[in-house]
């Protein structure tokens, strides 16, 4: 495969990752973290860039990809977990969130607010029609996303950030209460909001398919090219996160902001006047559009294989129709359910991927995977319910006494305990239930 092809696939991967959350959260982190910015952004980059990259690498290393990794727990768990992940990063959460943010930032600032509901309907109708057309032919994704749309997106981002560095001379403010102590862990948890680690579970099949279309068949070469494409996308994401975060940190003295969209809107206006809003609208529209295309394509490929009776085109149609419908509910309603889900799903994903890299030490022992995921899942679910606002009573007290609970990482010790117990069980269990791959 040519170096140019690797570059364009890397750019395509970047555009698929870079959506609404990637734009909104770094500048808000910058405003809140203040003088603790570098510690906080390091934590954010670990989960916002490092973890998605590690997930992508793990998928390329394992024959059968994420399905095989999930099967090491149990085939039923694998199917349920992946269906939930795909539906969440697809039509039920991430897709409508991105489409709605594209409208909120790309068009709403320029229209009469009294007709916003009708205009949202018309905007999302056109938005999803274009998503459907491009998603119908995944082989053209590299051309549309990697060669055309992503360069325009990057140029727009560079203009905004460079002008921000030159014109914004505000000093970093004192950190907010949330970042006064534990800035790293706070940034680490905030990185969940990009949803990119979960997206990697879906994007892995898309990237591997794109590389195979270039004639690469050898497993080692597939992993090598995936690694290179991931490094390109990860480097760009990290640079963008740091740049947006610094813009936010320098804007802290310019007023009170409730979220990242307010910060970027204010910054673009301060820096570029009325043209700044147009530039920001272009950035949000392109970023959200490319992500929705990537997620729609991934859902189409996964569900058409899971349910062979339904063709890829039919699944894409259903995904776009559901995404179109939910995007008209409004951004606040969509975001209400995102944090509890992420707090639940991320720990399980982190544990699964971590076990994958240490797999040779316990040779696919199912008991290790099952026990680790069970212990992690219990406390991850409790964290999700708590994030949703439910009163857990004694269970909440139990969560709070665990190590790292103050950082939102109370699941770490149970994950370790579950792994150790699983290894102990595995020693006593006959070998035929150990090697999951031999059963496939």
Image (cartoon, grey):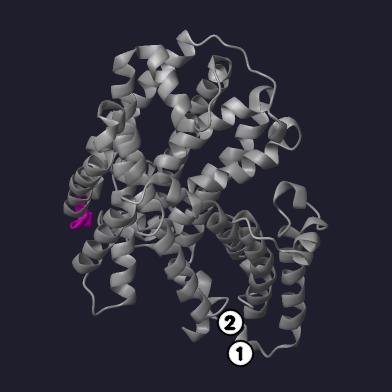
Magenta residues, dominant SS class = helix
Q: Residue at x 48, y 66 (%)?
A: 62
Q: Residue at x 53, y 31 (%)?
A: 258
SS for callout 2: loop
Q: Which of the pair 346/15 is nearer the observer?
A: 346
Is 321 displayed left or right of 73 in the figure?
A: left
Residue 394 is marked as none
**Lateral position of residue 139 relative to residue 235, left or right:** left
Report whether residue 12 is seen.
no
Circle 1 residue: 432
Q: Name the residue under label 2.
A: 435
Quadrant in which residue 304 is drawn: bottom left
Report crowding for label 1: few under 14, some 14 to 19, many 20 or more residues within 10 A (C-alpha).
few
Q: Give the number of marks.
A: 2
Asked if residue 138 lies in the magenta stretch, the reply is yes
Q: Are marks 2 and 1 in contact (CB under 8 Å)?
A: yes
Check the image and report above or below for 120 versus 41.
Answer: below
Residue 186, how many percent across, how many down?
66, 40
Q: In which quarter of the image is residue 368?
A: bottom right
Residue depicted at 55% across the width and 48% down the height: 192
Q: In which quarter of the image is residue 422?
A: bottom right
**Horizontal and vertical percent position of residue 425:** 74, 82
Residue projecting furthest to the front: 114
Q: Helix or strand or loop: what does disc 1 sit on? A: helix
Left or right, 68 with respect to 120, comes to right
Q: Give the range drawn in magenta.
A: 134-140
């Amino acid at each position: 495969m040519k170096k140019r092809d690797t570059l364009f696939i890397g750019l395509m991967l970047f555009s698929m990752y870079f959506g609404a959350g990637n734009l909104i959260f770094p500048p808000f982190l910058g405003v809140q973290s203040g003088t603790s910015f570098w510690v906080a952004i390091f934590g954010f980059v670990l989960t916002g860039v490092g973890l998605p990259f590690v997930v992508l690498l793990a998928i390329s290393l394992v024959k059968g990809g994420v399905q095989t990794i999930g099967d090491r727990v149990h085939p039923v768990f694998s199917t349920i977990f992946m269906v939930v992940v795909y539906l969440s990063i697809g039509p039920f959460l991430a897709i409508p969130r991105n489409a709605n943010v594209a409208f909120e930032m790309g068009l709403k600032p320029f229209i009469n607010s009294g007709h916003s509901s009708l205009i949202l309907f018309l905007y999302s109708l056109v938005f999803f029609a274009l998503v459907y057309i491009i998603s119908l032919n995944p082989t053209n994704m590299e051309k549309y996303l990697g060669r055309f749309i992503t360069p325009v997106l990057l140029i727009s981002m560079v203009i905004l950030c460079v002008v921000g560095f030159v014109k914004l001379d505000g000093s970093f403010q004192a950190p907010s209460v949330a970042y006064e102590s534990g800035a790293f862990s706070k940034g680490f948890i905030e990185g969940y909001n990009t949803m990119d680690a979960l997206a990697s579970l879906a994007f892995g099949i898309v990237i591997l398919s794109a590389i195979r279309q270039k004639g690469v068949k050898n497993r080692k070469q597939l992993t090598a090219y995936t690694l290179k494409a991931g490094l390109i996308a990860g480097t760009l994401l990290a640079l963008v996160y740091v740049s947006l975060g610094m813009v936010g940190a320098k804007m802290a003295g310019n007023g009170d902001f409730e979220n990242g969209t307010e910060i970027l809107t204010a910054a673009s206006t301060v820096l570029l006047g009325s043209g700044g809003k147009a530039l920001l609208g272009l950035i949000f529209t392109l970023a959200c559009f490319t992500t929705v295309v990537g997620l729609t394509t991934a859902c189409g490929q996964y569900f058409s294989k899971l349910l062979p009776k339904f063709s890829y085109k039919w699944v894409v149609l259903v995904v776009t129709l559901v995404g179109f419908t939910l995007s008209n509910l409004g951004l606040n309603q969509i975001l209400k359910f995102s944090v509890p889900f992420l707090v639940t799903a991320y720990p399980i994903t982190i544990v699964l991927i971590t076990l994958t890299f240490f797999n040779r030490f316990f040779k696919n022992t199912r008991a290790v995977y099952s026990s680790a995921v069970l212990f992690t899942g219990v406390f991850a679910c409790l964290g999700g319910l708590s994030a949703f606002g439910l009163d857990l009573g004694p269970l909440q007290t139990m969560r709070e006494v665990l190590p790292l609970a103050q950082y939102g990482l109370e699941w770490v010790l149970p994950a370790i305990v579950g792994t150790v117990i699983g290894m102990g069980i595995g020693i006593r269990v006959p070998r035929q239930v150990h090697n999951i791959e031999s059963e496939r």
